[in-house]
Amino acid sequence: MAKRPKRAAEARVRPGHSNQIRIIGGRHRGRKLHFPDLPGLRPTSDRTRETLFNWLQPILDGAACLDLFAGSGALGFEAASRGAGRVVMLEQAPSAVQLLQQNKAMLDLAQIEIHRADALVWLEQGSEPFDLVFLDPPFAGDQLEVCCEKLESGGWLAPGARIYIEVDLSRGLPGLPHSWQCVKQKKAGQVAFFLYTN
């Protein structure tokens, strides 16, 4: 009797291996972390993170980082593994926050702070300057432009800060503050990603 061909979804997902990210550099290189299956949650790929953190390596040691849409934590945990001095992660979904906390405890990364919060609301409070900000919101939403405006006007960016932005290639970038300058940009599949400075 002939075996039934696997459907595409079955062929792609191996039991026990879905919803994982791998830290690709630094102290925790190779460690795998779990994240929940949530609509719009798509961790930054290994390939993109490799490129991004090659860009960031000269300024990362001891840097204060803000991850406004943490999701899986791929960017924040990578930054902490590679020597960031402080990493603040914001996430709204309770299941995602729970796994972020578990992963933080497993890796013993005391420099990470995790807050269950809406990024736009959080940016309305008293500000403090960050050296590096990760902006990778759900592609279907429209928070990116407002976040950029609040970061610029609210005093959240240290002089010479870096702002990482990831967008759907088909949608492109929204309007950004005029003072920001693009220092790096690249495409990977259907994603475009950029590094700006203020």
Image (tube, rainbow, N blue to C red):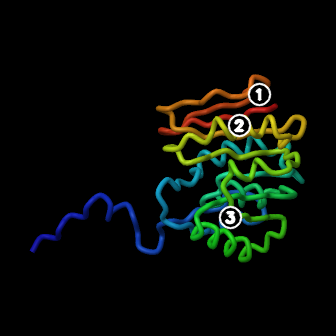
Which residue is the site of mark 3? 116
Identity, as a three-letter code, of the amino acid under mark 1: Trp
Q: Amino acid at mark 2?
A: Cys
Provide residue 41's location: percent of width, then percent of height.
52, 56
Q: Which mark is residue 26?
A: none
Judging depth in this view, the residue of 131 and 148 nearest the camera is 148
Sequence order check, earlier mark of 3 and 2: 3
Badge 2 is on which residue?
148
Categorize mark 1 by other alpha carbons within 10 Å: few (<14), some (14-19), many (20+): some
Q: How far, Cα to Cα, is label 1 from label 2?
A: 10 Å
Please provide percent x and percent y for residue 182: 72, 27
For the residues bearing labels 1 and 2, Cβ distance under 8 angstroms: yes
Which residue lies at the image location 79% right of the left edge and 64% below the top edge?
A: 112
Amino acid bearing label 3: Arg
Answer with mark 1 or mark 2, whichever residue precedes in sequence: 2
Say which of 106 and 161 sits in front: 161
Question: Which residue is depicted at the point 59% across and 50% down?
Answer: 44
Query: Taking 121 as reference, is 39 left or right?
Result: left
Q: Residue shown at 47%/32% (left/top)?
A: 170
In the rendered image of this protein, does residue 150 appear above or below residue 118? above
Mark 1 or mark 3, earlier in chain: 3
Q: Mark 1 or 3, which is nearer the eye?
A: 3
What is the crowding at mark 3: few (fewer than 14 residues within 10 Å), some, or many (at least 20)? some
Within-10-Å neighbours for mark 2: few <14, some 14–19, many 20+: many
Q: Which mark is residue 180?
A: 1
Kindly give the residue lying farthest to the top in the view shown: 178
Q: Secondary structure at mark 3?
A: strand
Q: For the N terminus, which image quadrant?
A: bottom left
Disc 1 versus disc 3: distance between alpha carbons?
28 Å
Residue 180 vs residue 20: left or right?
right
Where does the image place residue 173, in percent across and percent down from the top left?
59, 30
Mark toward the viewer: 1 or 2: 2
